[in-house]
Amino acid sequence: MTIRVAIAGARGKMGSEAVKTVYKRDGLELVAALDYKHVGESLSELEIFPPNLDVPIYTNLTQLISETMPDVLIDLTNPDSVYEHTKEAMLHNVRTVVGTTGFTDEQLEELTSLAKTNKVGCIIAPNFAIGAVLMMKFAKEAAKYLPHVEIIELHHDRKLDAPSGTGKKTAQMISEVREARRQGHEFETETMPGARGADFEGMRIHSVRLPGLVAHQEVLFGGEGQMLTIRHDSYNRESFMGGVVYCVETVMTLEELVYGLENIL
Amino acid sequence: MTIRVAIAGARGKMGSEAVKTVYKRDGLELVAALDYKHVGESLSELEIFPPNLDVPIYTNLTQLISETMPDVLIDLTNPDSVYEHTKEAMLHNVRTVVGTTGFTDEQLEELTSLAKTNKVGCIIAPNFAIGAVLMMKFAKEAAKYLPHVEIIELHHDRKLDAPSGTGKKTAQMISEVREARRQGHEFETETMPGARGADFEGMRIHSVRLPGLVAHQEVLFGGEGQMLTIRHDSYNRESFMGGVVYCVETVMTLEELVYGLENIL
Amino acid sequence: MTIRVAIAGARGKMGSEAVKTVYKRDGLELVAALDYKHVGESLSELEIFPPNLDVPIYTNLTQLISETMPDVLIDLTNPDSVYEHTKEAMLHNVRTVVGTTGFTDEQLEELTSLAKTNKVGCIIAPNFAIGAVLMMKFAKEAAKYLPHVEIIELHHDRKLDAPSGTGKKTAQMISEVREARRQGHEFETETMPGARGADFEGMRIHSVRLPGLVAHQEVLFGGEGQMLTIRHDSYNRESFMGGVVYCVETVMTLEELVYGLENIL
Amino acid sequence: MTIRVAIAGARGKMGSEAVKTVYKRDGLELVAALDYKHVGESLSELEIFPPNLDVPIYTNLTQLISETMPDVLIDLTNPDSVYEHTKEAMLHNVRTVVGTTGFTDEQLEELTSLAKTNKVGCIIAPNFAIGAVLMMKFAKEAAKYLPHVEIIELHHDRKLDAPSGTGKKTAQMISEVREARRQGHEFETETMPGARGADFEGMRIHSVRLPGLVAHQEVLFGGEGQMLTIRHDSYNRESFMGGVVYCVETVMTLEELVYGLENIL
């Protein structure tokens, strides 16, 4: 069976990668793009795509659905549009794979309830990089047995914020299974402030910023006489595409809304 | 509740560490040692233990059980003795934690059946290092999503065999969820034989041997634009003791035989 | 002082990166391109360059030199052309920075002698990645004190040959300061062939090939109770450009031919 | 030629390791120990040494020298004693290898001058771990070409101070060849204080403390499209012994005082 796919946000960075990925992938067929302009054109007419990409562009989702009958809508637009798209798609029994965060709690509840009522799958994935999601999932599991944890996240030096979102998210996930605890020596002192990093319930988070780096993270677990280290290296945007495909294939088997790739791995 | 523990093989390398660990640990009480000699003495009379270790030594397990009433027998002796000890302990409703491999299939079946009938827990753990077991467990799970795998195991240069047992075991566990597949370029050639390592169903295993190293392993998973790496470093025998304690505590809640620490983590 | 630079091979992968690098770099001025076609045009007329890149293209090197008076010619073409270009440039007292290997011994001797006679600098650099060259240089120095060495090189799985050129070159450089020696246990055995990697005078070389990887290498040195590891990660072609600039600046101070970036770091 | 060695501080942690190392090593002969007590005894009479270690103990260095004629005195005592020992040894033309820091500038000047006048070698080595000293030396050299640096040092969680002495020393050595520079994004912000680590002239130093760790350090250099990483792992006190032996052999060829192992590697 071929899964019929529509993509919203096809001209964005993630979206244009997704277009190429779905187009090439056996078992998937790209049947339409949803956009707020370029209606009536084809992706092949846009400069960023190769001329053979003959996929119609729609502005109206209902029309898109009735004319191209997609099984799955991949939505890589902004939070505002995503909520409306997802709701409408589900009302028409079209499954959705969403790569944006930023839903309100009420919106999430409504979509969750709608998915259950209509028995239509929906996956909302703040992070599509399967390797990164596995790292976080494993880190959460390891912390049950090896509760002394430090996180080192390493990014290019154009990054503005420290620690990274993934660094914080990892610490939060670990804190769900680990009680806050003091780490390091009771009388530990920093002779240079900041040496021991940021403190999240006793876990230390260290942020390295250097040119040359892309996006990397190590989670270190120490126990008597041993260390366990889980590391993820992300080199480019392609790292997200495996996750997108995995979600498209998995959402076909779901009859509810799932938040977070870690819950279907 | 304090768990009453007896140890078989107390004079061995692992056993003497276990004695110290159980002795110090809150919630555990070391009530007896099982040995084939030194009967009637106390561990405190043996040179390798401190003089305050007043724990009686028995040669006869039935007598040990009736006089000291242990909840758990930790058996760190050789395969021959372990089978007899485990069987006898279970017949007396004493739980066992076993650190030896080398059971025959028949012995394992008999012990499994006995555990079920008597509803008495038994854990057989070829590897007590929790970090190493987590590494293998995570590797098996990651391979479902990122099936391109290579293993690098690194040991001191006094090690005789390559690859290591853990290296092979990791590859075997991965092969349970991953079909054999060719890795690397179709026309790949070694200009120096051995460069690409050992081949286990397409997974490559590389064995590094250097003075200074202890026991380390990395499992590398490659996907488009990303890498996931799981690494374990074992620095000394203490790394096993966390696992021994975990098994003693966990076996109290079991009514069957479990083979492999990974199945209770 | 601004260094006037001409580039041969400007349309190639390396060459076009070099064009952009020299163009942007303070202290360097891109005055001409040498090509076998497109004569009389400007780089700005080629599709791969931005329209403001107003740099004349020449087919004849003598004419290029007399009309644009470069201080340095960067040659990123193939071995055949490079020899002729370099010779002619030096005869006109133009310094050269060359990124190709493949000279015959006689050609190298002739160019070396010509550089000395004319007191004109020339740098031939098989590898422009400063980090990789430093790794090899440090590895050679470390091996004097820590002679137990293993090399792990890791590349994408589209690479055809194993070990990599850099892996072999590193082993060769180390062998200049280290006598061949057996490493590992005297009675070491491979239970799976290839586990211990390729053997270069006792040093073991391991080649990892996975999707997601780019070009990476670790050199591991083991000593009693310690390990020293030198690692280089190359993520993209930009990693060469720092070396190109460094060579252009350094060649201005030389009056002889230098082979290998390691000899001027 | 066998080098005759005396050791001061033989009963200390480092000293007793040095005794064993010198005793076993071909080309070295342990001829005496200097102590403030146990005079007239032999090391073999002390509990911590094996009974065959028949090496006389002296309290008076002059007497030790005249009776046992050592070529080299290894001094692993405290700073107070070391100054007196070193001075006296040099006056008797005995070379010294010293493992303590804590000399005043005047003492160092006096010893340096005395070594030159008497043409007698002396090595003062704050760190005997050859791998760690190479790491610092290479880091200093690499920073000339790749000036974006961060340091991650990792130690067991019983360590009181952060950053480690080696971490600071590495940053200081790098600062001798690198001007202070801001690293990271100009508008970088820490959403959790300390995330970016300690700041040493723009270099960031991160201190990880976990059970299981021993003493490790990574120096990371980032450049366009590449990373260079130099890592040292120290697993136990044996890691110092290679450096002690190297110093004993090297000091025989010196006619002056050298401060820091990095200056003779």
Image (cartoon, coloured by chain):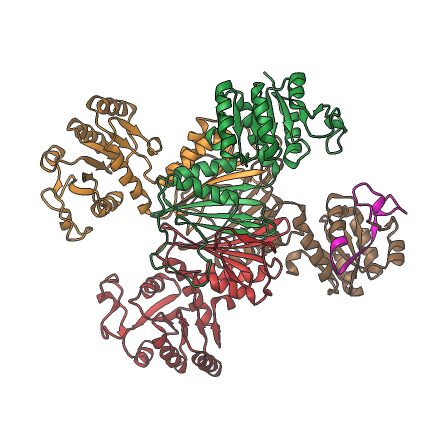
Chain colours: A brown, B red, C green, D orange
In the image, is A49 to the left or to the right of B249? right
In the image, is B67 to the left or to the right of C31? left
Residue C35 visible in the picture: yes
Tally of marks: 0
| Quarter of the image with the N terminus of chain C in it | top right
Estimate the x, y position of residue B215 in percent, counting from the top left: 41, 56
> What residue is at 55 percent from the left and 53 percent from the top?
B189
State the image quarter where residue D116 is shown. Answer: top left
- Vertical position of residue B60 compared to residue D87: above or below: below
Q: Was residue A27 drawn as part of the magenta stretch in this picture?
A: yes
Q: Was residue B186 drawn as part of the magenta stretch in this picture?
A: no
Residue numbers of the magenta segment: A23-52
Magenta: main secondary structure: loop
Single out the residue that lies furthest toward the front: C106
> What residue is at 54 percent from the left and 20 percent from the top?
C252
Estimate the x, y position of residue C78 in percent, counting from the top left: 61, 35
State the image quarter where residue C55 is shown. Answer: top right
> What residue is at 21 percent from the left and 21 percent from the top?
D117
Q: Nearer the viewer, residue C256 or D130?
A: C256
Residue D147 visible in the picture: no
- Vertical position of residue B32 compared to residue C133: above or below: below
Estimate the x, y position of residue B259 in percent, counting from the top left: 47, 72
Estimate the x, y position of residue B51 in percent, counting from the top left: 23, 62
Q: Nearer the viewer, residue C192 or D119?
A: C192
State the image quarter where residue A67 is shown. Answer: bottom right
Q: Nearer the viewer, residue C197 or B139?
A: C197
